[in-house]
Amino acid sequence: MNNGEHVLSGGCRCGAIRYEATSAPVSVSHCHCDSCRRSTGAPAVTFVMLRRADFRFLAAEPKFHESSPGVHRGFCPECGTPLSWHGDAQRHADVIELYVGTFDEPATLVPEFHIYYGERVAWYDTADHLPRYGELTSNAEPVSSAPKFLDGDAHQ
Ligand SMILES: [Zn+2]
Ligand SMILES: [Zn+2]
């Protein structure tokens, strides 16, 4: 998809922060962790992971808050919109994650799995059969592939 024409764009509510990416996402996932919840005010977030090499903020940079040691969450200093997540650790060095709601065309960015499902707010889930990992995808089998309210339509 990295043909020079594939451009994703987005920005904050007030328009002070704008960004673009020139390659397709590495992944799109729902995160139910407590840190995302507090950082956004939402019960869960949807992250779009992008290659840092193909991503840039345009006119202005966000302000960054260190939400955990070595983890930085970007937000607009003017309107407060939460925008991004990136980490200093080697395993995060090549990527940055943007919240799906900040993209100009979020419907084109389709989630593939859930992470930190074990930390979700008990009353919150989404109506899909995507794999649900207790923490990260790399350290466990999915804890579930669908919420209980969808059990009835899994005729297998
Ligand atoms: Zn703004
Ligand atoms: Zn999270």
Image (cartoon, rainbow, N blue to C red):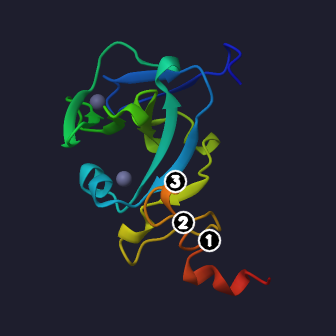
Q: Is residue 100 among what the camera can see? A: yes
Disc nearer the start of the sequence (2/1): 2
Indicate if the residue with disc 1 has its beta carbon within 8 Å of ligand 2: no
Q: In terms of depth relative to the viewer, which is nearer, 45 or 80?
A: 45
Using the image, determine if residue 131 lies above or below residue 148. Answer: above
The residue drawn where x is 57% and y is 42% is: 27
Using the image, determine if residue 50 lies above or below residue 109. Answer: above
**Image quarter of residue 71:** top left
Disc nearer the start of the sequence (3/2): 2
Q: Badge 1 is on which residue?
A: 145
Using the image, determine if residue 91 lies above or below residue 41. Answer: above
- Of circles 3 and 2, the one toward us is 3
**Image quarter of residue 6:** top right
Amino acid at dot 1: Ser
Report helix, strand or loop for mark 3: helix
Q: Badge 3 is on which residue?
A: 138
- Dot 2 and dot 1 residues touching (CB under 8 Å): yes
How busy is the neighbourhood of tag 3: few (under 14 within 10 Å), some, or many (20 plus)? few
Whole-percent x and y of residue 32?
40, 61
The residue drawn where x is 33% and y is 34% is: 89
Report helix, strand or loop for mark 2: loop
> CA separation, marks 3 and 2?
12 Å
Q: Is residue 93 left or right of residue 50?
A: left
Whole-percent x and y of residue 61?
29, 20
The residue drawn where x is 46% and y is 56% is: 136
How busy is the neighbourhood of tag 1: few (under 14 within 10 Å), some, or many (20 plus)? some
The numbered mark at residue 132 is 2
The residue drawn where x is 30% and y is 16% is: 60
| Quadrant where the image shows the N terminus | top right
